[in-house]
Amino acid sequence: MTSIRIPTGMNGPAGSANGGVAAGTIAGLLDGAVSVRLHAPPPLDVDLPVTTDQDGVVTAAGADGAPVLSARAVPRPTIPLPDIDPATVGEGTPLTEHPAATCVVCGPERADGLRLFPAPVPDHPGVLGTWWTPPTWASENGVLRNDLLWGVLDCPGALALMHQTDEPMFAALGSVTGEVLAPVRADERVLVLGFVLGRDGRKQHAGTAVLGREGDLRAHTTQLCIALPPAWAGPQG
């Protein structure tokens, strides 16, 4: 493959790709655990030429040759999953006054989106969760597409950071390290979690996970988000 393209409709902020979907698209060129950096908002419906350097780093560049995404294989990461009772997690509700209301993953205005709406887990500050079943359109051969699974792994972490803050902000994905351990079937109800790991000024750290009904870990990430004004994610951002 000499280029990648993120189709129109796979947006997060208005006018650019969902960070997780973009990360999953380039991560699909590598095996195992992958760390992806977003150098710039990934454009939609644009061919991004891909190169691989001598160290195995895969880079997708824009028309000006500047990197948009870069990815590299990494050792299998560990993740500090929150200890929660899955029975306390509901179906979730859309975020009120969502700054990226048309996001393909978590946007309440996207009837054609993934409709993933994690909500606070009782007695666990900084943890959001929801039970969720992938829509049929998101699957290939009965399995949730890998790029969309990475999207599912993106938004809950950002939303956890946005829920637990004194000032309104949009948590823009800066980098993410993750691994898909097992597929998610199109008709399978899974538990999706996002949780705050720490903050350092504008740098915000979160984790996410997708688990099967028996508690088996299917996929997980740790992510670095950058706190930006909510308007950044809107049509004029």
Image (cartoon, rainbow, N blue to C red):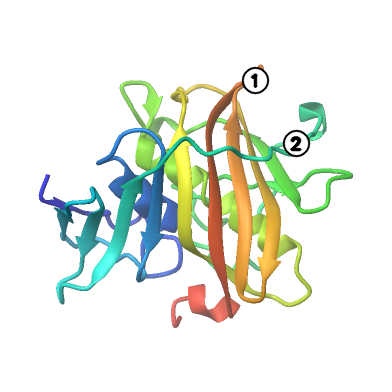
Image quadrant occupied by the C terminus: bottom left
Q: Specify whether 41 is left or right of 101.
A: left
Classify residue 89 by image quadrant: top right
In percent of width and height, residue 201 lies at: 66, 76
In percent of width and height, residue 72 lies at: 32, 48
Spatial CA span between label 2 and label 1: 13 Å
Q: How many marks?
A: 2
Q: What element carries label 2?
A: loop
Classify residue 235 by image quadrant: bottom left
Tell me: residue 6, above or below residue 65: above
Q: How crowded is mark 1: few (under 14 residues within 10 Å), some or many (20 or more)?
A: few
Give the residue at the far front of this rendering.
55
Q: Specify whether 7 is left or right of 199.
A: left
Of the two numbered discs 2 and 1 in the rendering, the one whose residue sits closer to the viewer: 1
The residue where tag 2 is placed is 90
Q: What residue type is labelled 2?
A: Gly
